[in-house]
Image: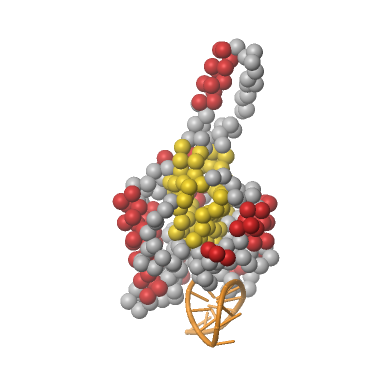
Amino acid sequence: MVLSVKITRRTPRRAFALYVAVFSCSANPDAQWLMPMRLVTWNINSLRLRLPRLDDLVAALAPDIICLQETKVPDPLFPEEAVRALGFEHLHYKGMKSYNGVAILSRHPITPVENLPGWYGKEDCRHVGAVISTPSGPVELHDFYVPAGGDIPDPDTNPKFAHKLAFVEEVTEWFAGRKPERAILVGDLNIAPLEHDVWSHKQLLKIVSHTPPETERLNRWLETGFVDAMRHFVPPQEKLYTWWSYRNRDWQKSNRGRRLDHVWVTPDLVPNLSGMTVVREARDWVSPSDHVPVVVDFQF
DNA sequence: ATGGTAGAGGTTCTA
């Protein structure tokens, strides 16, 4: 139901009071006069190569904020003009040559969160944060790219796996000490925590991204004060993937996917959630990323 | 049991 009252100079005081009362009851997420905010997270796997795909994404979905991972571009070479031309004037990014790199693109002003830890002493461009202002107050947004961890799930023989486990432990400690409120955390976390976040739980238990040491650590990170916003919309017994390897001839036919990309919110923002979409069709775009965008809609 | 593909930037690494 849509209620609207046109306010004019002649509107009687009582009608104005009614309008104010109706407006201020709109904490209901169905209310249409709240400000919608559409957020996308996407491991783009090279921002410069896939700028045309970013254009497609913006044209199709009109997001307000886009969080990217694996931009693979050093800061001085970031394609600011091209991104501004898509309507995103407010940028906060951290990149390096060849690897990693994260970026927050926003249509509306944002305030970067400064002095975030470099993690594992590496400063390898895996985390940026920014504060968004909304009609109901500021919201803190974190964009992460967790190390993939190599092939062998043994921290003693594989330093990349040791890095991954330690990275998740460090960020967990940091969030535990911070007790986040009105926060959103997104990114390629490179871990598929639930049985139905992978195509075969049994076959992947010893495969990096779904091993118990990883999924246990990801759960501890989540439990520092977040809710899994994707699983808020899709029950845990339903398969849900965001990544399909390039190494499958026919990704749709084999459908050996994993849910490596995540959107978490603090419980105080759960009432603001209004929808979630995994943009599966993006896996079939020309020159696709191996990850697809995840869209989350809020009403603030 | 194995290898399959993609991106960056070089003659190999990371995913």
Numbered disc total: 0
Q: In the rendered view, tell whether residue A38 sits above or below residue A102.
A: above
Q: Nearer the viewer, residue A289 or A142?
A: A142
Q: Nearer the viewer, residue A210 or A162?
A: A162
Q: Is residue A256 something one can see in this rendering?
A: no
Q: In the rendered view, tell whether residue A262 sits above or below residue A159.
A: above
Q: Residue at x 62, y 27 (%)?
A: A2
Residue A30's x, y, as percent?
56, 34
Quadrant where the N terminus of chain A is found in the figure: top right
In the displayed orientation, state which residue is furthest to the front: A76
Residue A4's x, y, as percent?
63, 24
Q: In the rendered view, tell whether residue A271 sits above or below residue A242.
A: above
Q: Residue at x 64, y 62 (%)?
A: A51
Residue A31's x, y, as percent?
56, 32
Q: What colouring does the structure picture have?
A: secondary structure
Residue A18's x, y, as percent?
55, 17
Q: Quadrant of residue B9?
A: bottom right
Q: Is residue A224 left or right of residue A23?
A: left
Q: Nearer the viewer, residue A97 or B4?
A: A97
Q: Is residue A108 something one can see in this rendering?
A: yes
Q: Residue at x 46, y 64 (%)?
A: A125
Q: Residue at x 63, y 67 (%)?
A: A49
